[in-house]
Amino acid sequence: MKFIRNLILLLLFAGGALYVTNPDHEAFSAFLAEYVQQELADDAPGESEIGKAFRKGLGQIAGAAGTQLAQRQDLTVASVYTIDIAGRTHVFVGMAGQFFPIKDS
């Protein structure tokens, strides 16, 4: 009986922690800006400062537009964000203050 009580308390605590840390639109905007910058990153070691500034600017634009274009499905302990970028659908799961890409088609 003590084990079941402790298990229920643990699940309630974990669910409460996930509820509190469920990321919102502002967090998704910041994540999307960084994600776009990483996707546009040129792995060549000689990237110019202009290229880095251009990539950063595109990331900021994507992040600002992401809050308007993304569809959020709130699951209480997590959020699913769906956004179409350049004709491709991207799906991200936000949980515990983090985002994870799950679909890119």
Image (cartoon, grey):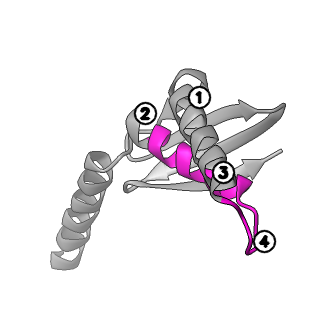
Foreground tag (2 vs 4): 4
On the rendered image, what quadrant is the C terminus found in?
top right
Q: CA distance from mark 3 to mark 1?
A: 29 Å
Q: Residue furthest bottom?
A: 3
Q: Give residue 54's position: percent from left, percent from top.
A: 65, 44
Q: Please tell me the numbered disc located at residue 50.
A: 3
The tally of labels here is 4
Residue at (61, 23) in percent of width and height = 69
Please say if the residues under marks 2 and 1 sit with CB atoms less than 8 Å apart: yes
Q: Nearer the viewer, residue 1 or 90?
A: 90
For the residue marked with disc 4, what is the amino acid? Ala
Where is mark 1, residue-wise? 70
Question: Which of the 4 image quadrants contains residue 60?
Answer: top right
Q: Is residue 5 left or right of residue 103?
A: left
Q: Which mark is residue 18?
A: none
Q: Which residue is mark 4?
A: 44
Q: Which residue is mark 2?
A: 25
Residue 32: x, y in percent? Answer: 56, 44
CA gap between label 2 and label 1 equals 9 Å
Q: Amino acid at mark 2?
A: His
Residue 46 highlighted magenta (yes or no) = yes
Pointer 1 local density, CA inside 10 Å: few below 14, some 14–19, many at least 20: some
Are the residues at dot 2 and dot 4 in contact (C-beta closer than 8 Å)?
no
Mark 4 lies on a secondary structure that is: loop
Q: Nearer the viewer, residue 93 or 12?
A: 93
The residue under the point 54% across, 51% down is: 34
Image quarter for residue 70? top right
